[in-house]
């Protein structure tokens, strides 16, 4: 893992296909996971563009932060993204779930502007229902079980993918995962989508109950240069569950707009 040093901390990232001439895409993971969730994108079978996948603060190999959930945490995660983007000359942001919220926050609140964004399994607001917030505080195992129920993180994934997802969430741990979800719950930029002035593609797994199709349709409708695509036979982690279909959609979009 490489690292970007900034703001008194280190943000770890993995970079692949360094010699390719295509624009560099920076992949931003969601709540309770790490850069490894993007393995099908930065690995050999992924799109041909150079890929960078980071660990947000407190995840994987990155230094943790002491922040309150919400705007304070979003600001810190956005600084992680900008630091890695500047160090790797990334031009495209690809964000899943919380990572999609962070990507929107980068576009709205920082001086660094991507050339394009892909937002998957996300929306302009990400409410978390009361029961899940309670379990994240008091019964982490139940929260993890709930998230891995059918049509939440996965529609019909193989057992190995589900096991890896559970292992990543356990490794990130209850404290950071809860901070992530509470930050999602506080996130709401519905009245600012018109300020995002780069091409954006929202990609939704057709069975996603965590961030359903209307979230993605809102992004596509309210962002001036927005569009939407749906991945069949997938839920929230479409890039894990149906990587070939997901990668094809991303590659086609980037070829069209860059």
Image (tube, rainbow, N blue to C red):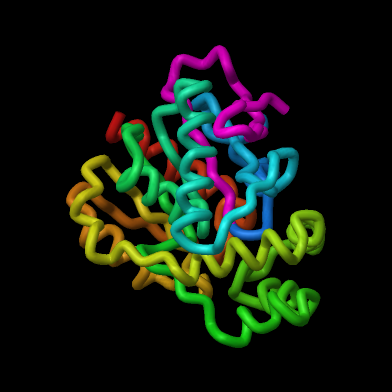
How many numbered circles does the render carry? Answer: 0
Quadrant into which the C terminus falls: top left
- What secondary structure predominates along the stretch shown in magenta? strand
Residue 207: give x, y in percent of width and height: 52, 72
Q: Give whichever of 38, 60 is nearer the camera.
A: 60
Left or right: 6 as drawn, with respect to 91: right
Quadrant into which the N terminus falls: top right
Q: Which residue does the image show at 43% across and 45% down from the upper left?
A: 249
Left or right: 178 as drawn, with respect to 73: right
Q: Is residue 234 above or below residue 145?
A: above
The reply to whether the magenta stretch includes residue 19 is yes
The answer to whether residue 92 shows anywhere in this view is: yes
Residue 3: give x, y in percent of width and height: 66, 27
The answer to whether residue 233 shows anywhere in this view is: no
Q: Which residue does the image show at 67% across and 69% down from the upper left?
A: 156
Q: Give whichever of 199, 138 is nearer the camera.
A: 138
Q: Give whichever of 43, 200 is nearer the camera.
A: 200
The reply to whether the magenta stretch includes residue 121 is no
Q: Which residue does the image show at 45% across and 69% down from the upper left?
A: 186
Quadrant of residue 69 in the image?
Answer: bottom right
Find the magenta span and give its range: 1-30
Q: Is residue 99 above or below residue 147?
A: above
């Amino acid at each position: 893992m490489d690292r970007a040093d900034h703001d008194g901390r280190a943000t770890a990232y993995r970079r692949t296909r360094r010699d390719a001439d295509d624009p560099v895409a920076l992949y931003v993971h969601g709540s309770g996971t790490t850069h490894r969730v993007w393995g099908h994108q930065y690995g050999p079978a992924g799109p041909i563009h150079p890929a960078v996948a980071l660990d947000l603060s407190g995840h994987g190999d990155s230094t943790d932060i002491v922040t309150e959930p919400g705007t304070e945490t979003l600001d810190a995660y956005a600084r992680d993204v900008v630091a890695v983007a500047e160090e790797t000359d990334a031009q495209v942001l690809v964000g899943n779930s919380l990572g999609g919220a962070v990507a929107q926050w980068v576009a709205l609140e920082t001086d660094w502007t991507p050339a394009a964004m892909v937002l998957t399994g996300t929306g302009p607001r990400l409410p978390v229902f009361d029961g899940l917030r309670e379990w994240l505080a008091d019964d982490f195992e139940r929260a993890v079980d709930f998230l891995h129920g059918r049509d939440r993180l996965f529609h019909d994934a193989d057992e190995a993918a589900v096991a890896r997802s559970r292992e990543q969430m356990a490794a990130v741990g209850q404290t950071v995962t809860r901070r992530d979800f509470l930050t999602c719950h506080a996130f709401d930029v519905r009245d600012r989508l018109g300020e995002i002035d780069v091409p954006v593609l929202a990609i939704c797994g057709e069975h996603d109950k965590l961030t359903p199709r209307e979230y993605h349709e809102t992004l596509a409708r309210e962002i001036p240069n927005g569009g939407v695509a749906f991945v069949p036979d997938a839920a929230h982690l479409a890039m894990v569950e149906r990587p070939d279909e997901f990668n094809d959609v991303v590659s086609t979009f980037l070829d069209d707009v860059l």
